[in-house]
Image (cartoon, grey):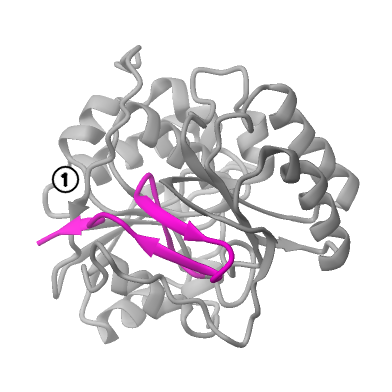
């Protein structure tokens, strides 16, 4: 039975920094993937960290990594175990939404720590933001990203945030090899929130839908043709989720022509007169940069810059 509060938490607290020689827990709240455990342990060991692999990571139940009970138990135990310093998701796929109405958000709030993932994990980012109120990290997962040898700054972007090397006032640096596109000019300050566009839309009408009031909306997606991206954005618009945005940061939208996407984004957001910056390398892409969900940021679309306005971890 969930202990979810009916009160939406608006303040997003920083989480404890990942310490040197810390212990990272790996869970699979969504889909399964074959994991080379010894390689994963060696990869982390080479960076000074230990790894605990939770049981659901090694299970497979069709398109799910273990049963709902197993995956929920892993999630709760990874947060409640004081020896675990950070939580890294194995992969996305599908399965996270099945857990939402059974999560003990008070347990998570009492044991807040860095939680990292993207894609289907968006459902958990939105729910934690809404009902536990601490910063989480839209960033690389173990199998496809870190063990998949994605290029820098995939790894450095993740660990610089988790270790507390970036604090309030820091610029979130974007690689110059991947030019950004200003869709609409302007500067806006707000909490960064969002993730996978399909998952954001899928949670509308539920108690776990995105709280869009005053946020900088981040969106990314993969394998969705342009008309479906249009449909998803229209869904958010008709649901009233775009009216109170302060700005929009668009990540990687894999498989969509960039010029066509830019036209669609301009059609969608120009009437709102808010800054919109596109092309940020976060999501199903290489490199895959980490973003702090729920953190206060400033988006300067004209200067193509994103600034942290709060500490996202504390030491």
Please state, as top left, top right, bottom left or bottom right, where the C terminus lies in the image: bottom left
The quadrant in which residue 79 appears is: top left
Looking at the picture, does residue 50 appear above or below residue 236? below
Residue 160 in view of the camera:
yes
Write the residue at 77% across / 42% down. 268
Does the magenta-highlighted stretch encompass residue 293? yes
Q: Quadrant of residue 307?
A: bottom left
Q: Residues within 10 Å of mark 1 (few under 14, many from 20)?
A: few
Q: Seen in the image, is 165 located left or right of residue 244?
A: left
Residue that mark 1 sits on:
81
Residue 267 coordinates in the image, percent (x, y): 82, 45
What secondary structure is found at the residue carrying circle 1? loop
Is 227 displayed left or right of 270 in the figure? right
Choose between 214 and 47: the one closer to the eye.
214
Q: Residue 137: x, y in percent? A: 39, 55
Residue 54 vs residue 134, the one in the foreground: 134
Q: Quadrant of the N terminus?
A: top left
Determine the residue positioned at 37% across, 35% down.
128
Q: Is residue 261 above or below residue 124?
A: below
Relative depth, front residue between 299 and 136: 299
Residue 143: % across, % down: 51, 68
User: How far from the left and from the top, in percent, is residue 263?
Assistant: 85, 56
User: Front-most of 262 and 90?
Assistant: 262
Q: Is residue 110 above or below residue 195?
A: above
Q: Does the magenta segment cover residue 290? A: yes
Residues in magenta, as a range: 289-315
Q: How many marks?
A: 1
Relative to 282, is 266 on the left or the right?
right
**Residue 30 appears in the rendering:** no
């Amino acid at each position: 039975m969930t202990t979810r509060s009916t009160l939406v938490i608006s303040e997003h607290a920083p989480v404890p920094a990942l310490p040197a020689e810390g212990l990272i827990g790996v869970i699979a709240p969504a889909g399964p993937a074959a994991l080379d455990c010894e390689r994963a342990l060696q990869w982390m060991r080479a960076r000074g960290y230990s790894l605990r692999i939770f049981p659901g990571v090694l299970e497979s139940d069709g398109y799910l990594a273990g049963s709902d009970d197993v995956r929920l138990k892993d999630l709760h135990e990874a947060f409640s175990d004081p020896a675990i310093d950070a939580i890294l998701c194995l992969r996305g796929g599908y399965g996270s939404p099945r857990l939402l109405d059974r999560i003990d958000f008070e347990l998570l709030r009492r044991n807040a720590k860095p939680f990292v993932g993207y894609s289907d994990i968006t459902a958990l980012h939105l729910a934690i933001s809404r009902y536990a109120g601490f910063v989480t990290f839209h960033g690389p997962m173990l199998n496809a990203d870190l063990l998949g040898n994605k290029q820098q700054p995939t790894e450095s972007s993740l660990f610089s945030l988790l270790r507390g090397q970036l604090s309030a006032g820091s610029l979130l640096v974007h690689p110059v090899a991947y030019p950004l596109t200003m869709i609409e000019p302007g500067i806006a300050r707000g909490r960064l929130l969002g993730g996978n566009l399909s998952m954001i839309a899928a949670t509308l009408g539920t108690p776990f839908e995105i709280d869009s009031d005053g946020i900088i909306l981040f969106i990314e997606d993969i394998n969705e043709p342009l008309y479906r991206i249009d449909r998803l954005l229209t869904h958010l618009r008709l649901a009233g989720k775009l009216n109170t945005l302060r700005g929009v940061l668009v990540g990687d939208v894999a498989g969509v022509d960039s010029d066509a996407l830019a036209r669609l984004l301009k059609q969608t957001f120009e009437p709102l007169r808010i800054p919109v910056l596109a092309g940020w390398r976060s999501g199903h892409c290489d490199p895959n940069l980490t973003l702090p969900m729920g953190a206060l940021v400033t988006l300067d679309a004209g200067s193509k810059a994103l600034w942290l306005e709060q500490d996202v971890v504390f030491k």
